[in-house]
Image (cartoon, rainbow, N blue to C red):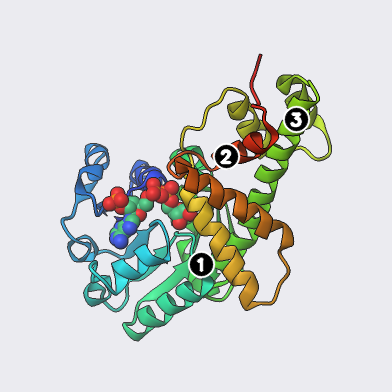
Amino acid sequence: MKEIAYLGLGIMGRGMAANLLKAGYPVTVWNRTAARCAPLVEQGARQASTPADAVAGADVIMYCLSDDGAVEDLLWGSGKLLDAVQAGQIAIDLTTLHPTTSRKEAAAYAERGVKFLDAPVFGSKNEAANAGLWIVVGGDRALYDEMKPILETISETTHYMGESGKGASMKLVGNLVVASQLEALGEAMVLATKAGLDPQDVLGVLHVTDFKSPIFDGVGAALAQRDFETHFALKLMLKDANLIASFAQDLNSPIPALAAIRENIKAAVNKGWGEENASAFIKTLEEAGGVQVKQA
Ligand code: NA7
């Protein structure tokens, strides 16, 4: 079985690394904050002290970090990953970042004889833990076919989108929909509350209609319970909204609704809710409406 180096054990990374171990892959882990490696070591991973130590002898290098800056720091900055990789290795970046950064990574790896896929994921904490992610991939088609068994170990489905950067592009397209659904849920639940409707009754209708969505079901139920436990941090959602805005600007693509939603997310982060779940931005709508969505 291919030897895997897995770098970055945040909410998403720790679930993915655990599922690779469960599937029997030999996995070496590295995380900037070393203490986060402990649960993976208990599950059979080898712990590396540096990215260079982690990738020595690996066939496949995988990482899912916070954002573009973290990936740039890993490759070109303090992580010095590009100095450590060997020709013939394969790198897979599962981070949500700007497609330009993916293409920059692909070019830097190519200079060193390393093949590369951008493979960001849909889903959050539970899907990462339960191997239920949906992965969108950019890069060489033959390389995607070769890596599919590994990607299938951590996902429900995988989708080849085209050349380098196309996985990252698809991820931003999808997150535009996620942000819009959260905004729609928030506006709808605040309106329903002001109208005196019972949140459970409202969610019951949303659950069966032709505009139903698992996001309405999951986030809606948590909202009614005032549960903002972090599955996907609000501060990362602001990062994604900023990425979508920049990506749309590059392509001269209109995003009037996303621009307004981004302001709500920004206001919520400025309120100090950045470490809470992404759905916490709905609280800005509640404040504007002077009500709180709550199960009686
Ligand atoms: P988390 O839980 O915030 O995890 C982020 C990870 O990125 C975590 O392992 C961090 O290490 C790591 N990180 C952050 N900055 C750096 C630098 N500069 N160098 C190395 N490692 C770094 O995020 P999620 O797991 O929820 O999300 C990950 C991605 O998936 C993100 O793009 C989302 O939008 C989707 P730390 O433990 O802080 O030392």
* Amino acid type indicated by mark 2: Ser
The percent position of residue 220, horizontal first and vertical second, equals 65, 31
Between 100 and 143, the one nearer to me in the picture: 100
Q: Which of the 4 quarters of the picture holds residue 76?
A: bottom left
Q: Which residue is mark 3?
A: 207
Callout 1 crowding tier (Cα within 10 Å): few <14, some 14–19, many ≥20: many
Q: Nearer the viewer, mark 1 or mark 2?
A: 2
Look at 81% across and 25% down and name the residue there: 195
* Numbered label tally: 3
Q: Which of the 4 quarters of the picture holds residue 165?
A: bottom right
* Amino acid type indicated by mark 3: His
Which quadrant of the figure contains the C terminus?
A: top right
Q: Which residue is mark 2?
A: 279
Q: Which residue is mark 1?
A: 144
Look at 33% across and 45% down and name the residue there: 21
Is 83 located above or below residue 268 in the figure?
Answer: below
Residue 218 appears in view: yes
